[in-house]
Image: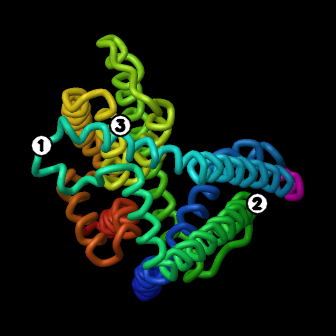
Amino acid sequence: MPSMTVTRSTWIIAVAALFLVLYLHLLPALLAGLLVFELVHLTAPMLAKRLSHQRAKLVVAVFFAALVVGALVLVLTLAIGFFGDAGRLANLATKLAEILENSRESLPAWLISYIPSSVDEVKRLVVTWLREHAGEVQIVGKEAALTLAHILVGLVIGAMVAIQATVGSDSPRPLAAALAERAARLAEAFRGIVFAQVRISLINTVFTAIYLAAVLPLFGVQLPLTKTMIALTFVAGLLPVIGNLISNIVIVVVSLAHSPHVALASLGYLVIIHKFEYFLNARIVGGRISARAWELLLAMLTMEAAFGLAGVIAAPIYYAYIKAELRAAGLV
C-alpha cells in the first residue's frame, strides 16, 4: 500500500500528463497507444499465462503486439484510402453542389440566398477560399502528417508497454507501482468509453442503413452515395456529438436530390434516432462509469471550450478516469 505522499504525487503527475497531452496535441498518440495496449493486454496474457518460460511469454506477447499493430495500420491505411481519395471526395462535393443547385426552386426564399446558384459558383468559391487561405491549408496538411506520425508512434509505444506488462515480473518501487495503478485506471476508463462508443456508433449505423437501404426504397426513393453515407455514419459516429452532425448534414443534403419532403423525412428520422441514442449513450457509457448523461455533456462542453474538438473527444475518457480515481479514494 503506497503512502499518501506517493499517491498524491502520482495524482499530480497524472493530471499534469493528461493536461500536456491536450496542450501539446498528443491526444491521437495517447488514444492509439491505449487502443493497442488494451487489445494486446486482453489477448496475449491468455496464452502467456499458460507458458512457464519467460522467453516463450515474450515471443507470444511480441507476436500479438505485431499482429495488432499491423491490423490497425492496415485499417488506418484503408480508411485514409477510402476517405482521403481526392477523386471520391471531389465526386461527393460535386454531387452535393449539384443537389443544392437542382433544389433551389423548391427551397424557401430565405434559404436560397445562402446557397450558391451553380456548381461553377461553388468551384469558384472553393478556389477563392483556397487561394486566400493557402498558408492555412499547408499548415493543415503538415498537421495531418504530424498527427499520422504521432498515431504510429503511439501504436508502437502502446505495444511496447503491453509487452512489458505481459512478461514483466520485477517488483516495482512505490512510485512506479502507484503510477502503474493510475495508468491502469486510465486504460480501464478508455476501454469502457471507447468500446461503448463503438457499440453506439454501430447501432446508429445499423438504424441509418435500414433507413437508407430498406425504408426509403420501399417508398420508391433511391438515394445516391448510399454506401458512402453508411460508411461515413459509422466512422464519424466514433466522434461524440460532432460526428453525428457531420453525417446527418450529408444525409439531409443528399436527400434533397429526390425532394424536400424526403429531406424533411430524413431529418425527422435522424432526430428520432439520435434522441434514442442519447438514452442509449446514457445507459451504455454512463452505466460503465456510474455517470448520468448531463454529467458527460457538461464535461464535454467544458473540455470543448478549453481544448476544442480534441477536448470533446477526450472528455468522456478523462471524466471516467477522474471519477474512477475519486471512487477508489472513497470520495464519491
Left or right, residue 263 beside residue 180: left
Seen in the image, is 244 located left or right of residue 42? left
Q: Residue at x 44, y 58 (%)?
A: 123
**Viewer-side residue, 31 vs 275:** 275
Q: Is residue 183 visible?
A: yes
- Write down the quadrant of residue 209 in the picture: top left
Mark 1 → mark 2, Cα distance in angstroms: 66 Å
What separation in Å lies between label 3 and label 1 (alpha carbons)?
17 Å
Q: CA distance from mark 2 to mark 3?
A: 52 Å
Q: From the top left corner, tell me how far across and down residue 252 is, in percent.
A: 29, 38
**Residue stretch rendered in magenta on the structure:** 52-57
Q: Position of residue 112 (x, y in %)?
A: 18, 50
Whole-percent x, y for residue 204 in the image = 36, 35
Q: What residue sits 82% from the left and 50% below the top?
A: 63
Q: Is residue 100 above or below residue 310?
A: above
**Residue ID for mark 1:** 108
**Which residue corresponds to mark 2?**
167
Q: Depth check: 325 or 240 in front?
A: 240
Residue annotated with mark 3: 254
| Mark 3 or 1, nearer chain start | 1
Q: Which mark is residue 14?
A: none
